[in-house]
């Protein structure tokens, strides 16, 4: 186990390999992803929904040739679901099947690896092959679980009372994502590299559209991302995310448009925006230029 | 003498490396002074990160330090500003030695670039503008605002925007593309303005040293900005921050209920657990209590005297309602009206505008009358307060010497779960003049000073 990872040569290398994996990072993302490997620290990615936080972890796994282990967080997530659990049914069967045997023997047997159900965290730690551990939406879990996670992430080991301590054979590359529904504890933040991911700038989003929906002509892609950016500057309940831009591009292609004018935009806005109020606001914004040139 | 030259280069490089850690530490110090929480362990991480990246790339160093020292998006602005001061960009734009530009010619170029320029072009223009119109080198005193004022006295950005748009009009008549263009011109000019400010800081830092400039730069972090002095720039940020706080408030109220634990015995899970102990239920499992949605009732003073605060409280109402918390909002000046529906449908800005037309909050003269408003509320909606309701009153309790009707609060407190009052006035002036704080505070679980987001966040922590 090494502290200093050497999977990536420099941020430019990260960028190239993520691109090969179908993810277009900007320089901030590439630098932090590089440092995550080099310093051996978990990367905490925060930002609005749909900017590609989870995608980043997936692309990193591809770029590193690693297995992606995903722990989806939700309220009430506990150790049994995240770390490990004994397979009671199987243990019970074993006890009944060996009814005549000495208890010590049976006990040794039923508390062995064979009866252990590994959950994502233990799996990521004990895996001998390279892994990327994605802890998705960490802000959803309770404080107790955050503390547990803290322990796992700082030592990369898990203690199973009946078995002993399982230490990481290889440190997994850890990515945590958060939608910022609550403030994470200072201790957790301190252990992580912090990456705030926002909506991409024009050039990057255009590139993403062109890469993901290759049928889109360049001029249309340009128009799309400009409109989307204009909409994001509004006060919307749910601003359009990257995935929605892609859906919109796809929809326009299916409908056979190769340019967007006012009418087309208004007719297809519902792909982009999911709230009635938002649609109204956006419609008004796109049709009446409030600062007409004088 | 190649060996000596080599030695000189080597020692220069050595100094460089010794110089960087001390620079990073001075930077961390300045961040702490600005209120950004940077732990000592973060310093160490920052140094390790700086050592790992390519120091010739300023952008990489920037992101590496940001990843290790900034732990919250709201602190990024302060970080970026100070970063420019401590790690100024190299002067490669050729603007320094140049002759001052003619204003008219410069404005023409800026207008053209506002239509189609990229960020690098705008930065170059910004540095030219500061060189030509800022006069930073000629003067020792004066903060960054002074030089910024000088630059923008010469360059009227609104005028440039108009010019850029009117020149474009000829070849673009379609409303959609006009709208997009106007958005982009606005965006580019904002970039330009920020670049001008950054350039001024760079020149000052060059002249007077980073620490000196950093001290003058300490601007309040978003959570410390007084509600009464929010600038247009800060408002958007504030709105974002309020949304986060609202979400937190809603979830804290829910968590509190969840933590009231130990519900009924869960037979199924108890039995399953007992298998581990040979069928003896040593470790009984309980069904957690059902999570109920928090109920919140907001009573907001929206009169002129607290207008700035009211805008914020209404944002809070709006955001809370968006969180799926069961919230009922009431607004009052001298009488009270329910505004829940107003917020359910519209976006925040819209709702604020419609508040004055659609809600009946003024009865007599438009001066705050807490007594009358409370009385009307009690007559009309008292039964909206149930044992599960938390009541939040938001206002300065300046009652224009009218009857206070404090018994209403006493009654609401009896009916509800909790009653809190958030007061935007500094606690020092509570109870002076026409303030009825003392009379009202007696009937509240707590009356809290709430002038900025930090205080609001602290309040949220205490109630949940």
Image (cartoon, coloured by chain):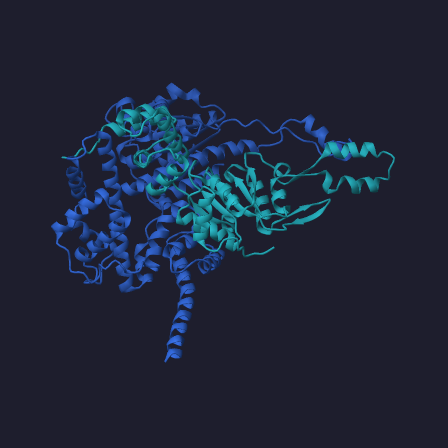
Chain colours: A cyan, B blue
Residue at x 50% of width, y 38% of height: A137
In this rendered view, identify the residue nearer to me: A159 or B28.
A159
| Residue A91 point in image, percent of width and height | 76, 35
Quick one: quadrant of the N terminus of chain B? bottom left
Answer above or below: position of B407 versus A209: above
Answer above or below: position of A216 versus B141: above
In this rendered view, identify the residue nearer to me: A49 or B80.
A49
- Based on the displayed image, in which of its 4 quarters is residue B393 positioned? top left
Answer above or below: position of B6 versus B349: below
| Residue B114 point in image, percent of width and height | 22, 44
In the rendered structure, the answer to whether residue B244 lies left or right of residue A176 reads left
In this rendered view, identify the residue nearer to me: B256 or B93.
B93
In the rendered structure, the answer to whether residue A68 lies left or right of residue B31 reads right
Observer able to see residue B435: no
List the single residue furthest toward the right.
Answer: A100
Observer able to see residue B165: yes
Residue at x 32% of width, y 51% of height: B219
In the rendered structure, the answer to whether residue A93 lies left or right of residue A206 reads right
Answer above or below: position of B45 versus B293: below
List the single residue furthest toward the bottom.
Answer: B1
- Based on the displayed image, in which of its 4 quarters is residue A223 positioned? top left
In this rendered view, identify the residue nearer to me: A261 or A34.
A261
In the rendered structure, the answer to whether residue B264 lies left or right of residue A258 reads right
| Residue B386 point in image, percent of width and height | 47, 23
Q: Number of numbered discs present?
A: 0
């Amino acid at each position: 186990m090494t502290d200093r990872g050497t999977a990536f040569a420099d941020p430019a290398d990260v960028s190239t390999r993520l691109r090969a994996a179908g993810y277009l990072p900007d320089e901030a993302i590439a630098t932090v992803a590089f440092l995550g490997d080099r310093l051996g620290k978990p990367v905490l990615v925060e930002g609005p929904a749909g900017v590609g936080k989870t995608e980043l972890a997936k692309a990193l796994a591809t770029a590193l040739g690693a297995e992606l282990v995903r722990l989806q967080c939700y309220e009430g997530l506990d150790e049994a679901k995240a770390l490990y659990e004994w397979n009671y049914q199987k243990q019970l069967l074993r006890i009944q099947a060996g009814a005549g045997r000495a208890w010590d023997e049976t006990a040794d047997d039923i508390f062995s690896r064979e009866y252990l159900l590994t959950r994502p965290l233990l799996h990521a730690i004990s895996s001998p092959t390279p892994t990327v551990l994605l802890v998705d939406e960490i802000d959803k879990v309770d404080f107790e679980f955050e503390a547990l996670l803290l322990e796992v992430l700082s030592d990369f080991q898990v203690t199973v009372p009946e078995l002993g301590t399982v230490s990481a054979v290889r440190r997994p590359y850890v990515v945590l994502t958060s939608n910022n529904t609550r403030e994470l504890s200072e201790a957790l933040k301190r252990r992580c590299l912090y990456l705030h991911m926002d909506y991409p700038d024009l050039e990057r989003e255009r590139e993403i559209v062109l890469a993901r929906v290759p049928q889109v002509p360049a001029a249309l892609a340009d128009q799309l991302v400009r409109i989307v950016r204009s909409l994001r500057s509004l006060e919307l309940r749910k601003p359009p995310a990257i995935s929605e831009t892609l859906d919109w591009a796809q929809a326009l292609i299916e409908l056979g448009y190769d340019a967007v004018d006012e009418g087309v935009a208004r007719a297809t806005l519902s792909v982009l925006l999911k709230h009635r109020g938002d649609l109204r606001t956006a419609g008004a914004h796109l049709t009446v230029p409030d600062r007409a040139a004088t | 003498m190649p060996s000596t030259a080599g030695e000189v280069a080597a020692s220069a490089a050595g100094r460089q490396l010794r110089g960087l850690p001390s620079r990073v530490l001075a930077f961390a110090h300045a961040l702490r002074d600005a209120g950004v929480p940077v732990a000592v362990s973060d310093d160490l991480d920052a140094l390790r990160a700086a050592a790992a990246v390519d120091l010739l790339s300023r952008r990489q160093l920037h992101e590496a330090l940001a990843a290790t020292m900034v732990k919250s998006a709201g602190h990024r602005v302060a970080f970026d500003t100070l970063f420019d001061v401590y790690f100024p960009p190299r002067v490669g734009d050729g603007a320094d030695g140049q002759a001052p530009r003619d204003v008219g010619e410069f404005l023409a170029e800026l207008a053209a670039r506002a239509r189609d320029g990229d960020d690098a072009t705008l930065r170059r223009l910004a540095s030219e503008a500061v060189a030509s119109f800022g006069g930073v080198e000629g003067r020792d005193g004066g903060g960054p605002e002074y030089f910024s004022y000088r630059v923008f006295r010469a360059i009227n950005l609104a005028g440039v925007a108009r010019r850029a748009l009117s020149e474009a009009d000829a070849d673009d008549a379609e409303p959609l593309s006009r709208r997009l263009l106007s958005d982009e011109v606005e965006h580019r000019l904002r970039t330009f303005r920020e670049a001008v400010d950054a350039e001024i800081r760079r020149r000052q830092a060059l002249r007077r040293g980073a620490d000196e400039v950093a001290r003058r730069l300490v601007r309040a972090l978003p959570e410390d900005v007084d509600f009464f002095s929010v600038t247009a720039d800060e408002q958007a940020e504030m709105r974002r921050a309020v949304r986060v706080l609202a979400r937190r408030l809603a979830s804290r109220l829910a968590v509190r209920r969840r933590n009231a634990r130990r519900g009924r015995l869960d037979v199924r899970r108890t039995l399953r657990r007992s298998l581990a102990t040979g069928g003896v239920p040593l470790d009984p499992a309980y069904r957690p209590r059902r999570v109920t949605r928090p109920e919140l009732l907001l009573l907001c003073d929206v009169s002129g005297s607290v207008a700035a605060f009211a805008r914020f409280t209404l944002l809070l109402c709006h955001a809370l309602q968006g969180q799926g918390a069961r919230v009922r909002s009431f607004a009052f000046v001298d009488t009270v009206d329910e505004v829940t529906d107003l917020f359910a449908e519209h976006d925040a800005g819209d709702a604020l505008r419609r508040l004055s037309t659609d809600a009946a909050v003024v009865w007599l003269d438009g001066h705050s009358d807490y007594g009358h408003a409370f009385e009307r509320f009690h007559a009309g909606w008292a039964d909206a307060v149930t044992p599960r309701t938390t009541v939040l009153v938001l206002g300065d309790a300046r009652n224009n010497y009218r009857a206070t009707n404090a018994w209403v609060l006493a009654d609401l407190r009896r009916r509800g779960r909790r009653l809190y009052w958030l007061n935007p006035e500094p606690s020092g002036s509570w109870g002076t003049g026409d303030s009825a704080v003392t009379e009202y505070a007696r009937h509240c679980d707590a009356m809290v000073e709430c002038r900025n987001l930090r205080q609001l966040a602290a309040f949220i922590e205490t109630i949940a």
